[in-house]
Image (spheres, grey):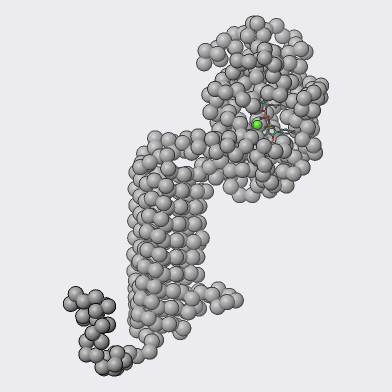
Amino acid sequence: MTADRKTRTQTQKSPSKRGGSHGPRPLACVILAGGLGTRMRSALPKVLHTVCGKPMISYPLSAAWGLRPQKTVIVTGVSSHEDITRALSTAGDAPEKTKMKLSFALQREALGTGHALLTAMKELKGFGGSVVVLNGDFPLITPGTVRKLLGLHRRHGNSVTLGSFIAQDPGPYGRIVRDSAGLPERIVEKTDLTPAHEGIREVNSGLYVLEPEAADLLGKIEKNRTKKEYYLTDILALARATGLRTGAYPIAPEQEFAGVNNFRELCMAESIMRRRIVEGLMENGVRFVNPGSAFLDAGVSCAPGVVIYPNVHLQGSTSIGKGCIIYPNVRIIDSVIREGALVLDSSVIESSDVGNDSQIGPFAHLRPGSVIRRSAKIGNFVEIKKSTIGEGTKAMHLSYIGDSSVGNSVNIGAGTITCNYDGVNKHRTVIEDGVFIGSDSQLVAPVTIKRGSFVAAGSTITKDVPEESLAISRVEQKNVEGWARKKRGGSKTAPGKKMAQGKTRGTTRKGL
Ligand code: UD1
Ligand code: CA
């Protein structure tokens, strides 16, 4: 804050030929994502690597959307263009994106950030407004910070404004060199540092605002001699030399601007993001038994009163209703868990809807398309796929229920299997309200068990079962008296009996 006030005063003292008087102009945003991302050593474009479940680029994009720009241009590269355009045109945050009227500028050769912005300006031909530029690789940026920089830029009537931050270790960032009056003079990249720059900890964030008179200078940026690239950072010195008003303001802590260039930095950014998400939810009344081992994506919502045990992974657009308890080692993806539900240890829930006051697990697996209605119980080692389970229905042990519609108050015995696949096609099983399925039954689909019926344990059901009836399909039991004794060669006592009297198996054998 102190630095902020200091630089502001200094900028105001700056003589300026132009600038200083313009009111807010129409606004466009440019996101730079045309780099090669070589330091990631990955085939996936850098900005598509996810941070807490969302592609890195979606964060600067949301920050840009906070300004409600008239246009947003994303600079892509030859190797990343297709992937980036596809990723940003499919679902996810689509509503925001469609409103943003995104356009893409293909930078055919990664000739540096200055060249990237110049490429984007072609898309903005005739626009004539202010342009906010954001690097695509700083996912921790917040809309508030972008708004703050734009505010400073307008208040000072600058032609070029950049956000800076004070780095603990300035490492790979461009150093902000200030003149004796404290005004920003130029930016020196890591490759061009000399001993004179030692000790500079104020660095360039990768967030800029440019007025048209500054954007006009982009073509004048010269190739950097060391890296053979056109550096956008050179715009500062160029604008200053032309007499334009410039400013650099340390507007946010280092954390917000942590650039991601490799997997180490990605991991660091993600752990900060994760903490942000968890802390936000704690403020909202969610209890984390161990916040350090909760892994929640940015799109997850949790109502107050939720309790989350250690090592829980909540992913995608999952939402957890009031009073739910999520026990250890659970993973839930793109699912809705409604009020009062319990998800017991080591369960996996994918793209499913879990009703109020129901209970899932331990060790249950709900695969995509499962709908579990109110107060149902899905227990140990039960797998459900693309099925609806009615209110108060129980499947507590060792079952597979696939492509099924199960009514209310049904009891599914241990080891029940819906045989939904005949090797070629999938078929549906219908189990109506109040049915009792005995343990170890196989229901060979397509098949319907009508309301209120019973299926005897161990049955293989291949035909529909009418209402209120018993279906039993197993070989009738026959007891052959004395059969076992005869098999043992006439011994009167079963081995189990002697063992029970304290003899070891060895001594029993000796006696024979
Ligand atoms: C850049 C800045 C540096 C700043 C840092 C903040 C330059 C020259 N340096 O360095 O001052 O401290 O960001 O994180 O700008 N890109 C393109 N086309 C290209 C090259 C890059 O679109 O030809 C994009 C990248 O995809 C990336 C962004 O621009 O999203 C920044 O590029 P990167 O190579 O990561 O710059 P840094 O070396 O981190
Ligand atoms: Ca970078």
The answer to whether any part of residue 431 appears in the image is yes
Camera-nearest residue between 83 and 261: 261
**Residue 151 drawn above or below residue 66:** above
Query: Among all residues in the image, which is located at the extreme left?
Result: 501
Q: Is residue 409 above or below residue 109?
A: below
Q: Residue at x 72, y 43 (%)?
A: 80
**Residue 23: quadrant of the picture:** top right
Percent across and percent down for residue 73 are 71, 36
Is residue 212 toward the left or the right of residue 402 in the image?
right
User: Residue 329: x and y, percent?
Assistant: 41, 51
Left or right of residue 475, residue 228 in this image: right
Percent position of residue 186, x then y? 70, 16
Farthest residue, direction front: 510
Q: Classify the position of the C terminus by image quarter.
A: bottom left
Q: Nearer the viewer, residue 417 or 451?
A: 417
Q: Is residue 5 left or right of residue 400?
A: right
Which residue is depicted at the point 45% across and 69% down?
A: 401
Number of numbered discs on residues = 0
| Residue 124 position within the rendered picture, expressed as x and y whole percent measured from the top left | 76, 32
Q: Nearer the viewer, residue 146 or 20?
A: 146
Residue at (21, 76) in percent of width and height: 503
In this image, 451 relative to 213: left or right?
Answer: left
The picture quadrant where one finds residue 390 is: bottom left
Say above or below: 413 vs 245.
below
Query: In the rendered view, would you say 133 is above or below 154?
Result: below
Residue 453 is drawn in which quadrant?
bottom left
Residue 61 seen in this snapshot: no
View quadrant of ligand 2: top right
- Look at 47% across and 35% down and name the residue there: 276
